[in-house]
Image (cartoon, rainbow, N blue to C red):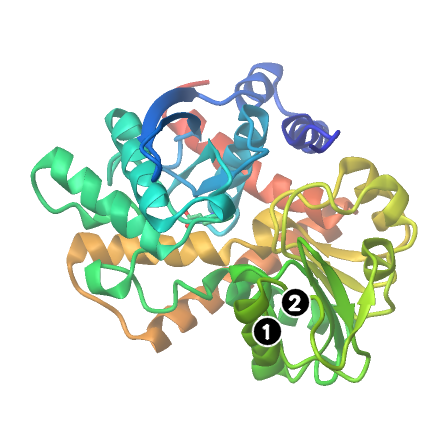
Amino acid sequence: MTLENPFENSRKQLAKCAAILGLDESIHEMLRHPMRELRVTFPVRMDDGSIKVFEGFRIQYNDARGPTKGGIRFHPEENIDTVRALAAWMTWKCAVVDIPLGGGKGGIICNPKEMSDGELERLSRNYISSIAQIIGPRKDVPAPDVYTNSQIMAWMVDEFSKISSFNQPGIVTGKPLTMGGSLGRSDATARGGLYTIREAAKVLGIELKGAKVAIQGYGNAGSNAAKLAKEMFGCKIVAISDSRGGVMNMDGIDPEMASQHKAKTGSVTGMLNTTPVSTEAFLGLDVDVLIPAALENVITEKRAHTINAKIVAELANGPTTPEADDILFQRGVHIIPDFLCNAGGVTVSYFEMVQNFYMYYWSEARVHTRLDRKMTDAYKAVYAASQKYNIDMRTAAYVVAIERVVTAMKDRGWI
Ligand code: GLU
């Protein structure tokens, strides 16, 4: 259990931005709270015949800019404050890449690693029927997140379609291609992040060919980031880690081999030609780019002093605490903040929604080009705000996002 409360951290970040923009107190107050929260308990039949009761959440943080959007996490340490923070970050995320959506998030307290496929299917179906009243293709659209994937999305679509008595592919994004998924969605978070790394490298004058990269977390975002960093820019992946530990090789780790090793053994640890590395040493490695791609609160105040990377590209949500942020800014580390860096996933989710509404599907090349444009424009807007106000990149991302959300709230006559 983490000691930091991500929701309190997200409010601290917001407060910094509110001060810079001189936000009206009532507007600030509105942005400090989710607009709607649903907490559900529901039963699931386990393989041994017993019934287990699970707790889940769906939070719709702010829908001024459009229907709420955001993933569903399955995690044993899930709690409502984490989901609140993630829902807030989704709101700013959709605003910073300028897609017409608000922010939401869902979660179930469970340990998917200890559940069979059948149990996970029943869990996913029962959760969707528990929250069915408040979701919909024009209301609130879930997606994959930590420990959820396209198979889980497929069960959710199927369950919601049964409830509605017609086919509803648009109820979630991140679906398999066979039922309305979008080409380019599966590696979109990583690819989007790499476009922002490319832009940051231009601004900082860093050559990405041969640049040393360390990636903490080897799930969907982390493993794809490793493969694409090598493929797109010729970077050298020197360290990777997952929940069981980290490994390094300064001559380079082959990302494909790491994926194969993880598929076989369940972890990247123990991989051939690598040496083990502790979390502290991992974060302190002398690299060009450090990519946190796992969970919240990894870069803390204490660890911030030891970070040696030129760029910290946050593919995870909330990996850096506000105290650590200040230290990294003073030390001149260039942060590409989470809700900018990892916005590629929801951007292609938005493309998936558009394709579902039209029932007309794009080529992968079209998805990549449009994603690149969105991420590049967003990075440039945030970088310009950081220069204009002489503020860190995270606060600058808030400035860009909050201005857009507040304008929509005003246009609607809320405030
Ligand atoms: N879970 C992803 C995120 O945190 C994607 C959300 C989505 O596609 O709606 O951005």
Q: Quadrant of the N terminus?
A: top right
Compare residues 72 and 127 and report the one nearer the observer: 127
> Callout 1: 10 Å neighbours few (<14), some, many (20+)?
some
Amino acid of disc 2: Val
Viewer can see residue 224: no
Compared across the picture, whether 182 is left or right of 373 comes to left
Q: How many marks?
A: 2
Q: Position of residue 409 (x, y in %)?
A: 43, 27
Q: Quadrant location of residue 133?
A: top left
Q: Position of residue 352 (x, y in %)?
A: 30, 57
Amino acid of disc 1: His
Say if disc 2 is inside 8 Å of ligand 1.
Answer: no
> Callout 2: 10 Å neighbours few (<14), some, many (20+)?
many
Q: At numbered mark 2, what does the secondary structure look like: helix, strand or loop?
A: loop
Q: Are marks 2 and 1 in contact (CB under 8 Å)?
A: yes
Identify the residue under disc 2: 268
Name the residue located 25 percent from the left edge and 38 percent from the top edge. Answer: 138
Q: Position of residue 76 (x, y in %)?
A: 55, 35
Name the residue located 46 percent from the left edge and 56 percent from the top edge. Answer: 345
Compared across the picture, whether 275 is left or right of 241 comes to right
Decide: is 405 above or below 272: above
Compared across the picture, whether 75 is left or right of 237 comes to left
Identify the residue under disc 1: 261
Viewer can see residue 411: yes
Residue farthest to the top? 26
Q: Position of residue 334 (x, y in %)?
A: 77, 58
Compare residues 117 and 346 and report the one nearer the observer: 117
Residue farthest to the left? 165
Decide: is 249 above or below 65: below
Compare residues 384 and 175 and report the one nearer the observer: 175
Q: CA distance from mark 2 to mark 1?
A: 6 Å
